[in-house]
Image (cartoon, rainbow, N blue to C red):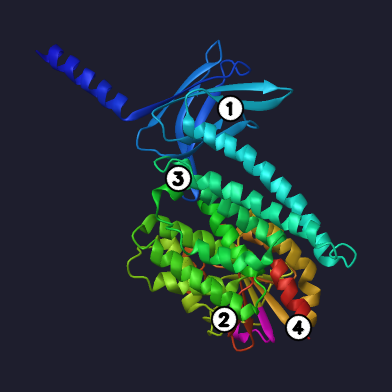
């Protein structure tokens, strides 16, 4: 009886597995007995859907979840791979090489044939448009050429005709297919990118079109386009021909849209907010970082990871204009490798400005940044800026060795993340930098020593 039940359960589990999996078969004779992987997308991330190995004839089978509809990426080797549409029940692909060029053919996939066909046609149309637009500019800006209105009309008509052919191709795709949704979004991303170089007057239009996209749509989340659309959208705003304050205003509108649009997807919202926050900081868009951080902290529907919340909190409690916490030097403090006794607390350091940099000997980025800071130190001293390095090291010998070469003040209480200055300044990563004035008011929040250098250069 037990054996009978085991057999029944085994059959049922096999049936369930078959129902819940789709199959992608393929042939790649040039890669025998090699690993082949299929990746899917989840918003800002990609992840492994399936993995197999080609047999002695180059055949392979990849099984992936039935509920995955989106774009996939097949990785054959470290340098070879291609994208495909994962929507149909069974897909077969033949992979060959001609003169070391990868060729991919689908024998039973309508959507992937369309995917490949449009990629070729769209590229040809874009190349043609580029040539016609070049001629259009010549005729528009040349007193000699723009006299001939017939040629100019011919050029204008041809440009519109090519655009219409592309548009017509997309709207006539079968609505039940994934490509009927994906390809217009892929084209939008191309148009957004091209507008920066070709037609800046179209930027406001594409900014608005982004704000109409449902970012919580599973088709988008699995498209592999999510991250690129975010990046391109905010770069477009930066490139708008408007005052900087207006650029920041537009960014705030988009930040609000993203937070509201993703309000029902807590995980994706948190990851997207952190991704944008990092992007803004890298591009020195500190006001946008601050606006995003404060907006996320006030969003009661989003439960933030503790470290993320701490990072955002720095823009509420430690933003420019706030008075930074004072702290006492109650452990080892050195300057030029010898004990420093001129001040027993941060507030007692007599300088017009104080640059505090949190770091550690085990932080590779810190070592690079501190090396640059040493080269900048003499110039900073001439501008009355004193440097205080607060170390998160835990070993006294390591801290002394590491800080011995620094010409500026170095302090450590060996408590790592539980250090009082670290906790008071809400430090969540190293290096973290603050520039204070003589009253310990936060003057700037530099994101790097290169940023510090630009601030120092701008000081009189």
Q: Spatial distance from mark 3 to mark 1, Cα to Cα?
A: 21 Å
Q: Spatial distance from mark 4 to mark 3, Cα to Cα?
A: 48 Å
Q: Nearer the viewer, mark 3 or mark 2?
A: 3
Q: Which residue is mark 1?
A: 76
Q: What secondary structure is marked by label 4?
A: loop
N-terminal-most mark, 3 or 2: 3
Measured from the top left, where is residue 205 in percent x and y?
A: 57, 66
Q: What secondary structure is marked by label 1?
A: loop
What's the magenta region?
344-354
Q: Which residue is mark 3?
A: 222
Q: With respect to residue 64, does 443 lie above or below?
A: below
Q: Which residue is mark 2?
A: 320
Q: What secondary structure is marked by label 3?
A: loop
Q: Which residue is mark 4?
A: 459
Q: What secondary structure is marked by label 2?
A: loop
Q: Quadrant of the C terminus?
A: bottom right
Residue 410 makes an appearance in the image: yes
Q: Spatial distance from mark 3 to mark 2, Cα to Cα?
A: 39 Å
Measured from the top left, where is residue 337 in percent x and y?
A: 72, 66
Q: What residue is shown at x 52% (from left), y 59% (from top)?
A: 275
Q: With respect to residue 29, does 264 lie above or below?
A: below
N-terminal-most mark, 3 or 1: 1
Say whether residue 212 is left or right of residue 400: left
Q: Nearer the viewer, mark 4 or mark 1?
A: 1
């Amino acid at each position: 009886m037990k054996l009978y039940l085991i057999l029944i359960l085994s059959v049922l589990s096999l049936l369930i597995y078959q129902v819940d999996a789709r199959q992608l078969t393929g042939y790649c004779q040039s890669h025998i007995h090699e690993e082949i992987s299929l990746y899917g997308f989840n918003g800002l991330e990609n992840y492994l859907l399936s993995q197999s190995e080609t047999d002695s004839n180059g055949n392979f089978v990849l099984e992936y979840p039935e509920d995955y509809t989106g774009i996939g990426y097949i990785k054959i080797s470290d340098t070879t791979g291609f994208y495909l549409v994962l929507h149909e029940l069974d897909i077969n692909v033949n992979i060959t090489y001609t003169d070391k060029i990868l060729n991919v053919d689908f024998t039973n996939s309508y959507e992937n044939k369309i995917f490949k066909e449009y990629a070729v046609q769209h590229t040809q149309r874009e190349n043609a448009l580029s040539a016609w637009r070049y001629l259009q500019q010549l005729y528009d800006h040349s007193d000699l050429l723009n006299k001939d209105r017939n040629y100019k009309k011919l050029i204008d008509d041809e440009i519109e005709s090519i655009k219409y052919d592309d548009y017509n191709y997309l709207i006539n795709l079968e609505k039940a297919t994934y490509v009927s949704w994906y390809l217009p979004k892929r084209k939008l991303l191309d148009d957004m990118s091209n507008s920066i170089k070709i037609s800046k007057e179209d930027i406001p239009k594409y900014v608005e079109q982004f704000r109409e996209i449902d970012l919580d749509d599973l088709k988008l989340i699995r498209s592999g386009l999510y991250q690129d659309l975010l990046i391109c959208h905010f770069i477009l705003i930066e490139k708008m021909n408007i005052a900087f304050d207006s650029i920041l205003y537009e960014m705030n509108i988009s930040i609000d849209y993203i937070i509201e649009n993703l309000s029902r997807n807590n995980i994706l919202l948190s990851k997207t907010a952190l991704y944008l926050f990092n992007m803004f900081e890298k591009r020195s868009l500190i006001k946008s970082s601050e606006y995003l951080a404060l907006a996320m902290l006030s969003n009661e529907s989003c439960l933030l990871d503790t470290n993320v919340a701490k990072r955002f909190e720095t823009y509420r409690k430690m933003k420019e204009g706030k008075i930074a916490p004072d702290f006492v030097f109650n452990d080892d403090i050195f300057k030029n490798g010898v004990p420093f006794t001129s001040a027993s607390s941060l507030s007692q350091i007599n300088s017009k400005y104080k640059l505090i940099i949190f770091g550690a000997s085990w932080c590779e980025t810190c070592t690079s940044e501190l090396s640059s800071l040493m080269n900048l130190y003499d110039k900073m001293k001439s501008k009355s800026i004193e440097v205080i390095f607060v170390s998160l090291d835990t070993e006294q010998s390591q801290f002394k060795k590491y800080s011995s070469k620094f010409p500026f003040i170095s302090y450590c209480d060996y408590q790592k993340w539980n250090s009082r200055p670290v906790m008071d300044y809400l430090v969540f990563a190293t290096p973290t930098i603050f520039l204070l004035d003589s009253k310990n008011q936060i003057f700037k929040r530099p994101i790097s020593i290169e940023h510090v250098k630009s601030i120092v250069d701008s000081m009189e």
